[in-house]
């Protein structure tokens, strides 16, 4: 199994309703992309967040499932939406479990 972790940072102009919609779209990926065993996403409430406002964890069956996840059309549509609403930075961590 593989754990895929992403932290998202947005511009100051990104509205809360846009971030809410981003979380909704992220959570929908669980039902749209094969190989996902579990997916969680929500607002980061840590006071040590360094400006990263939303977190995502995706547990996938295999490394091959992770490799297919990135270019999947539903994932690419999400990435386009995040950029459109003001995504400014990401941290991505992938590891086997």
Image (cartoon, rainbow, N blue to C red):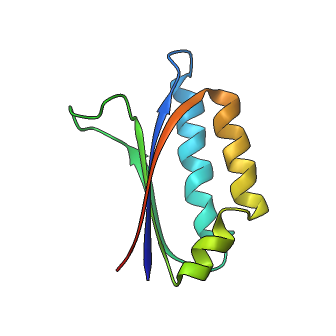
In the image, is 22 to the left or to the right of 84?
left
The residue at 29%/34% (across/down) is 49
Q: Picture coordinates of residue 24 (x, y %)?
A: 57, 49
| 12 w.r.t. 93: above or below | above
The residue at 58%/42% (across/down) is 22
- Closer-to-camera residue (96/22): 96
Which residue appears farthest toward the top when viewing the image?
A: 13
- Closer-to-camera residue (19/50): 50
Q: Picture coordinates of residue 89 (x, y %)?
A: 51, 34
Quarter of the view holding residue 51: top left
Q: Picture coordinates of residue 52 (x, y %)?
A: 39, 35
- Closer-to-camera residue (15/47): 47
The residue at 67%/34% (across/down) is 83
The residue at 53%/46% (across/down) is 23
In the image, is 96 to the left or to the right of 49?
right
Quarter of the view holding residue 29: bottom right
Which residue appears farthest toward the right when viewing the image?
A: 73
In the image, is 88 to the left or to the right of 40?
right
């Amino acid at each position: 199994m593989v754990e895929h972790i992403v932290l998202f940072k947005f511009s100051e102009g990104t509205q809360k309703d846009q971030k809410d919609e981003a979380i909704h779209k992220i959570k929908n990926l669980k039902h749209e992309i094969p190989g996902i065993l579990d997916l969680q996403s929500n607002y980061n409430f840590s006071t040590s967040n360094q400006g990263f406002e939303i977190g995502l964890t995706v547990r996938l069956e295999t490394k091959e499932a992770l490799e297919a996840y990135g270019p999947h059309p539903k994932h690419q549509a999400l990435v386009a939406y995040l950029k459109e609403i003001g995504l400014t930075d990401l941290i991505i961590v992938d590891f086997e479990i």
